[in-house]
Image: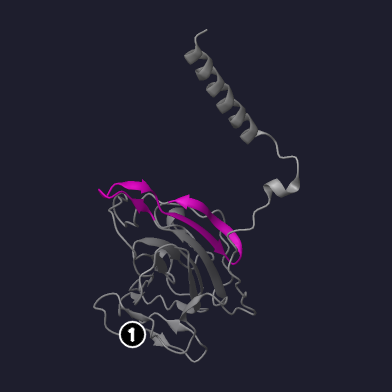
Amino acid sequence: MTRTNIISLAFFMGAFGFLCAQEKEPTNPEATEAYEPIPPKVVPGKNGAPPSDALVLFDGTDLDAWISAVDSTEAKWHLNNDGSMTVRDKSGDIQTKRNFGSVQLHLEWRSPKEVNGQGQSRANSGVFLQKRYEVQVLDNNDNDTYVNGQVGSIYKQSVPLAMASVPSGEWNTYDIIFHTPQFSRGGNLTKPATMTVLHNGLLIQDHFELEGPTEYIGWPTYQAHGKGPIVLQDHRDNSRVSYRNIWVRELD
């Protein structure tokens, strides 16, 4: 064996030994302990209050965080004495003044106690992330409709794992974890948006990969985009859906 071959073999054996050492099972607890990064301290909310790091979008006092999605004028929905707001029929959707990427969103919604309409015309509204991706709001109590359009569905894409609504006229909660889609510099999709939804504390959407923005007719198709507003829908059929206690934590 030449001197060059001996050196090459020694180098190979050394590298092999290093890799084996790296993969060797730790023999003490300290070898698997991490001390950085240190997570920020967040104080959880009590009795329905938002956590300390949340951005409050609606607390019942005003609609200052919202504008009309139609023409960017002030939001025209009803502000109620009980700390909620209600869709003003045919006034149009409202959206946040701020744009958001990936978020944890909490909100509470209520359909009217007095039942009116059927199918998709009973207390229909919706929560849109980035003005594109809708979680359906609907009164489905004794009111059947197509299951990928029922309450808790990711509209026309994902059927909820359960129908978890409380009786009509009582308050529901949605807790939504949304991760924005990712695109290459050329505008091609590299990672789809995902959504997890809890309805009244029950998991109804489990890290679902969205096929694209919500479409009423046709198949969803991604187009590259950045951050966008959160939108609450006026379905324009006298839905009278009310909302309260809306806050968001940015995950970007």
- Residue type at mark 1? Lys
- What residue would you read off at disc 1? 76
Residue 197 within the magenta-colored segment of the rendering: yes
- Quadrant location of residue 217? bottom left
Q: Report the side of 251 relative to 199 (left or right).
A: left
Residue 168 % position (x, y):
54, 73
Residue 219 within the magenta-colored segment of the rendering: no
Residue that extends furthest to the bottom in the rendered view of this protein: 81
Q: Which element is circle 1 on?
A: loop
Inspect this view and state whether residue 208 appears. yes
Q: Is residue 61 above or below residue 12?
A: below
Tell which of 51 and 174 is nearer to you. Answer: 51
- Quadrant location of residue 141? bottom right
Span highlighted in magenta in the image: 181-209
Main secondary structure type of the part rendered in magenta: strand
Q: Is residue 61 above or below residue 140?
A: below
